């Protein structure tokens, strides 16, 4: 019999966590694993990517007026579904650990994929207490980076040695360099061969700190006119960012806000360099996707970024919020095609060797197979 997994998330909207979940489900052997995805607040763009013929998708539709605690509702849902494994992700779904204990169903996994706050400030005590409780109740706790593991261990007092790490993986068949696509998309965007195209993909949230990238572009504009900036993503910061750009009349044709796009693979090919200016990160899927496309990348020295980018070898790092340093790096790469090519080749090599999607899926397979004695016993019988 297949192992039945119930994945619990806050929503199935656009984001790295949701994207990784869909990638994982798509690639786990359907003869070996069955899936139910339970969204607590609502569905979203990634819900449509799930193969509905073999994945049950449900939503509790929690509203702001509902009780802040959803443990009882989750426990009833878990009893109805009867999963072998309950896997909750991030703070928005952490109640599923307590609900799983209450329902007495399956092995319990909780994973953390990023930080909710914009800064590493201390969380409210009640949240820290509840997170520690959930960690203690879970059979397995994991994060997507060693830095994130250490942050949660320090905040909660839960031993770091009890927290596993599984890095996100990237699909190098989907995200890859293609000269024909590059030429076509650059022509479509009105990009000449000699224009230096900077790109950034991500939700326009404060934690992504796109404003630092725009300030760096202001420094770039003082030294060069042969540059363009593509901002791909949507969010509450868009108006503020557009107002900043509109304050520079000469930028009208140089900075484009493309909103959310289903053409990220094509747009990455049109870029000459990729920038990730976030204040905080776990393991950024967009960063891995850019590297798999063979792009030189510049990212902030925060979160899991240094685990992905070896500074000066497979990309460049800069301090959080340091627009001047970012400007200098952009100027250097804009002038040196040879350095861009070298960094891009090393970036591609690194993701293939250390951050492959196949490796990520294999680690989760092993996790799900070992998480409960009942599942492990059943696997042993099947193999006998």
Image (spheres, rainbow, N blue to C red):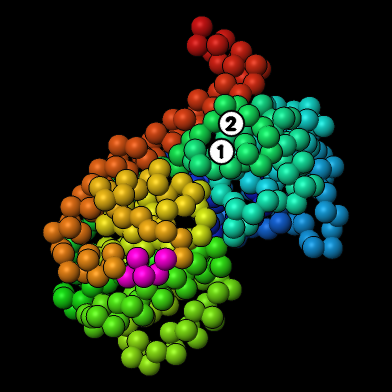
Residue at left offset 85%, top offset 42%: 72
In the picture, measured across the screen, residue 252 lies left or right of residue 84, that is left
Would residue 152 be counted in the magenta stretch?
no
Q: Residue at position x 84%, y 58% from top?
A: 66
Q: Is residue 61 above or below residue 282?
A: below
**Could you tell me residue 4's position as x and y percent?**
62, 31
Residue nearest the viewer, comparing 371 with 320:
320
The answer for how far apart the CA atoms under marks 1 and 2 are is 6 Å
Query: What is the total number of numbered labels drawn onto the structure image?
Result: 2
Q: Residues within 10 Å of mark 1 (few under 14, many from 20)?
A: some
Q: Which residues are magenta?
A: 322-327
Q: Which residue is mark 2?
A: 160
Question: Are circles 1 and 2 on residues that touch, CB within 8 Å?
Answer: yes
User: Which residue lies under the disc numbered 1?
Assistant: 150
> With 333 as the anchor, is 73 left or right in this view?
right
- Residue 172 image position (x, y, % from top left): 31, 46
Label 2 crowd bin: few (<14), some (14–19), many (20+), radius 10 Å = some
In the rendered structure, find residue 343 and report the number of the disc placed on it: none
């Amino acid at each position: 019999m297949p192992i039945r997994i119930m994945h619990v998330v806050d929503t199935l909207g656009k984001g790295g966590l949701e994207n990784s979940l869909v990638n994982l489900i798509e690639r786990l052997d359907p003869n070996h694993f069955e899936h139910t995805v339970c969204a607590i607040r609502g569905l979203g763009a990634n819900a449509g990517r799930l193969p509905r013929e073999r994945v049950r998708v449900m939503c509790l539709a929690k509203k702001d007026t509902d009780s802040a605690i959803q443990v009882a509702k989750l426990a009833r849902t878990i009893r109805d579904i009867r999963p072998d494994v309950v896997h909750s992700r991030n703070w928005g779904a952490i109640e599923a650990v307590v609900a799983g204990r209450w329902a007495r169903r399956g092995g319990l996994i909780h994973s953390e994929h990023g930080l909710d706050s914009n800064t590493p400030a201390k969380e409210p005590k009640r949240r820290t207490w509840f997170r520690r409780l959930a960690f203690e109740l879970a059979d397995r706790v994991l994060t997507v980076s060693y830095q994130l593991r250490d942050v949660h261990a320090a905040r909660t007092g839960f031993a770091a040695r009890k927290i596993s790490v599984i890095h996100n993986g990237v699909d190098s068949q989907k995200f890859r360099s293609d000269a024909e696509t590059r030429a076509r998309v650059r022509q479509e965007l009105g990009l000449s061969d000699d224009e230096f195209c900077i790109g950034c993909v991500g939700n326009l949230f404060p934690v992504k700190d796109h404003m630092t990238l725009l300030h760096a572009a202001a420094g770039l504009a003082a030294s060069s006119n042969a540059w363009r900036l593509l901002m791909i993503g949507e969010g509450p910061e868009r108006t503020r960012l557009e107002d900043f750009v509109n304050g520079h009349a000469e930028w009208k044709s140089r900075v484009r806000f493309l909103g959310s796009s289903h053409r990220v693979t094509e747009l990455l090919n049109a870029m000459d360099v990729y920038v990730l200016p976030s204040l905080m990160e776990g393991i950024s899927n967009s960063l891995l996707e850019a590297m798999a496309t063979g792009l030189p990348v510049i990212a902030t020295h925060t979160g899991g970024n240094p685990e992905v980018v070896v500074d000066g070898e497979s990309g460049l790092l800069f301090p959080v919020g340091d627009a001047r340093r970012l400007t200098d790096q952009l100027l250097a790469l804009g002038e040196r095609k040879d350095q861009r090519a070298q960094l891009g080749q090393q970036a591609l090599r690194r993701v293939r060797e250390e951050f492959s999607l196949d490796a990520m899926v294999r680690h989760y397979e092993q996790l799900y197979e070992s998480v409960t004695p009942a599942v492990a016993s059943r696997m042993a019988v099947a193999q006998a």
